[in-house]
Amino acid sequence: MVKSGSPEAGREPTCPADAGDSQEISKQEALRVTGISYGQFYRWKRMGLIPESWFRRRATFTGQETFLPRAKLLARIRRIQELKDRYPLEEIARMLSPDATRASFSRDEVEAAELLPPRAHAVIPLVARKETFDFADLLVLALVGRLASNDGLSEEHLRLAAETLQAHFDALSGQDGERRLAILHTQGVHLAMMHTGELLCDRATETVVSVSLNELAEEVKVRLRSIRE
């Protein structure tokens, strides 16, 4: 956790409501909404394209039903559908894996993948000036780029987020489930925190922004894969 005494930014809903997606969708509704078949859905599950950890059995008035996190599942299915005409499913499974690749990338590749946001040099000069980047570097750059699009965030917020991800990347990189980075505000102080699962805070703490590191890692891998074709 990194603290900052920066001025208050625009506030959003409190921590429990903002830190994770609590809405679920049943398997049957997901098939209907997306138009994919039962066989296709379970093939993707077997290949790890849809994580086993997302599946939850719930009792309903008609018996047992399988539910999954709505936003994450629909986003994942859209991503698979976007990629499956360009790549084999095995390659997509590797691209969407939460495990970070250990490959290194040149500055030219990073620039071609548009992973050097304009504000990176001011926020993270040591990373931005490198000539060779590992995956942790690229995730930090992508995080800065994502947060920089939010007008309510200052450079101090971006620096907090970048420093926290750099410091704790290894601690969360091997864990299953949803991994997020949140910028919080409490009693005039801003905090940056990485966590898995739902983040629960006291009533005095509010979430300024929360980013899914899983989704960010997927985005980085897709960008890198496209420039190495």
Image: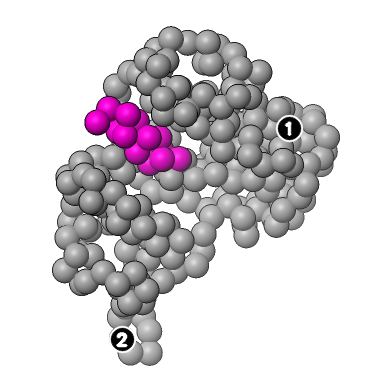
Q: Nearer the viewer, residue 114 or 192?
A: 114
Mark 2, residue position: 63
Within 10 Å of disc 2 (Cα), the crowding (few <14, some 14-19, many 20+) is: few
Which region of the structure is painted magenta? 216-229
Q: Amino acid at mark 1?
A: Ser
The dot on residue 107 is none
Mark 1, residue position: 154
Query: Horizontally, is 12 left or right of 21 in the view?
Result: right
Within 10 Å of disc 1 (Cα), the crowding (few <14, some 14-19, many 20+) is: some
Q: What distance separates the C-alpha of mark 1 from that of mark 2?
A: 50 Å
User: Residue 106's x, y, as percent?
Assistant: 37, 15
User: Residue 30's x, y, as percent?
Assistant: 35, 71
The answer to whether residue 224 is magenta is yes
Residue 112 vertical placement versus 40 (above, below) = above
Q: Could you tell me which secondary element the residue under label 2 belongs to?
A: strand
Question: Which one is in front in this view, the residue at disc 1 or the one at disc 2?
Answer: 1
Query: Horizontally, is 186 left or right of 159 in the view?
Result: right
Q: Residue at x 39, y 49 (%)?
A: 177
Residue 214 vertical placement versus 105 (above, below) = below
Q: Residue at x 52, y 15 (%)?
A: 127
